Image (tube, rainbow, N blue to C red):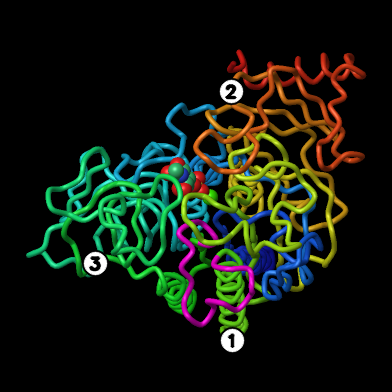
Amino acid sequence: MKKNIAFIVIAFLLASCQSNLNKQRLPNIIVIMADDLGYGDVSAYGQGTLQTPNIDRIANEGIRFTNGYATSATCTPSRYSLLTGDYPWRNKKAQVLAGDAPLLIDTSSVTLPKMLQKAGYATAVIGKWHLGLGGGNVNWNTYIPQNPNDVGFDYSYIMAATNDRVPNVYVEDGYVENLDLNDSLFVNYRKNFEGEPTGRENPELLKVMYSHGHDGSINNGVSRIGFQKGGKSAQWIDEDMADRFLQHSQKYIKEQKDKPFFLYYALHQPHVPRVPHSRFAGTTGMGPRGDAIAEADWCVGELLNTLEAEGLMENTLIVFTSDNGPVLDDGYEDQSHELIGDHRPGGQLRGGKYSLFEAGTRVPFLCMWKGQVKAGVSEALISQVDLFSSFAQLTNQPLPQNDSKNLLNALTDKNAEGRGELVIEGLGHRTAYRKGNWVLIPPYKGSKMVPWGVKNETGFDSEIQLYNIQNDPGQKENLSAKEPGIVDELLKEYQAIVGEQKK
Ligand code: NG6
Ligand code: CA
């Protein structure tokens, strides 16, 4: 009897040791999300001429996905999917948001970071947010309720929207950083504040000239979308932004000793305005867009160095990706077209940011986990929406009931299968369907080019489009007339997922 009890006690102790071990073994997770970085912008993809040696390190030591997608060809909807596990077109409001838009994610919903909190993780977002703040009519001079901390982040250090939208301030845990309360900050997206200079009226104050839009309030010699007044001590300096986000990320990593952590490191490059630090300006010969990518690449390298110095490399899974495809002139005269040379930001893919063609959503997608993930190239079909379920599997949490698929196997094994089909989104919640190597784009009314002056194709056509992207990665030949059976089959499946399609 005594022997039995001793045995049970030992077994119990062993079991609890084991579960502690399991807990200890949960890896840190870092998602590095670039902003408007194209499939061909990462040199590991071998499609362009720009060099990104540090991002390449993730590719070369981990898995490089050749069929990795953002859910949408613009930022807000993509990021919404990453954090909610839902396709963005399910939520009408998931469209590019103004800088004073209310929080898009329902605070009662289960999100990726909330799920990881349940699994015992410390969670942080550092960088670009663009998912709204507050409940409408934000008062920027006091605590802003409904911020990232309400949807699962223990710590947040963000810009509210984009670097081309007001307010041009950092928000830390719901408070505008460095705000002088004697100089209150006001934001308006409809009209200017009396006496405040704008890009349109005061171009002599600009160091970067706008090309379309972006003629509102001026900060740091750059005019933006929207109007702001006051809060001068809190206004950012674009040249310092990369260092800010990097230093906060490094500090965060160093401070996490007790728990595994999830860091969503949301780089602001190479989104416009492209104003890199002087250390990078002029280094690529490709103008500010190339230099901003060089700066982002350096940041990634520094982050990896920090993980190494802290001895965390073996215990950290890193995903590197981009929120949507590339664009050259996105509203500022920064010589992006003139200096592009032979570089192809979207590689051989057609379209770019805003596009239903492949370069809109097919993005660099890399996963590295030293000692756990064998290096290689994977053709598995995978979307950022799948990170939610995959990380749930990784951290022993129940799989969510949403659009996310558990692709942990694909993330960690270059030979594992990905998802069978995927819905991708272009402008205005218009969607297309990929299954295997087929891409079906339903007929859509609307301009073939992005209507406000960006030189990217929308992918819209009054004819239905069908492409075989294995044989025809540049989507040059519409096979819909030749393959009516495939069109019918794909259309049925697509409609079963998205319901009544948009026109
Ligand atoms: C567009 C802006 C563009 C960019 C984009 C959002 C104009 C003319 N263009 O409306 O510059 O800010 O919105 O980019 O205003 S995203 O990457 O955040 O989706
Ligand atoms: Ca973007």
Disc 2 on helix, strand or loop? Answer: loop
Task: Report the residue that reaches farthest toward the bottom.
Answer: 309
In-image side of 488 versus 310 (left or right) = right
Q: Residues within 10 Å of mark 3 (few under 14, many from 20)?
A: many
Q: Which residue is mark 2?
A: 446
Q: Is residue 168 above or below residue 111?
A: below
Residue type of the residue flagged with mark 1: Ala
The residues bearing labels 2 and 3 have C-alpha atoms spaced at a distance of: 41 Å
Mark 2 or mark 3: whose residue is earlier in sequence: 3
> Label 3 near label 1: C-beta < 8 Å?
no
Of tags 2 and 3, the one toward the viewer is 2
Which label sits on residue 309?
1
Q: Residue at the spot x=51%, y=54% of the render?
A: 116
Residue situated in front as seen by the camera: 212 or 140: 212
Residue type of the residue flagged with mark 2: Gly
The span shown in magenta is 269-288
Residue 13 appears in the rendering:
no
Q: Is residue 87 above or below residue 503?
A: below
Q: Residues within 10 Å of mark 2 (few under 14, many from 20)?
A: some
Mark 2 or mark 1: whose residue is earlier in sequence: 1
Q: Which residue is mark 3?
A: 234
Residue situated in front as seen by the camera: 201 or 464: 201
Q: Position of residue 96 (x, y in %)?
A: 45, 40
The residues bearing labels 2 and 1 have C-alpha atoms spaced at a distance of: 52 Å
In-image side of 331 versus 194 (left or right) = right
State yes or no: residue 271 in magenta: yes
Q: Quadrant of residue 239?
A: bottom left
Residue type of the residue flagged with mark 3: Ala
Task: Report the residue that reaches farthest toward the left.
Answer: 182
Q: Residue at the spot x=47%, y=50% of the render?
A: 331
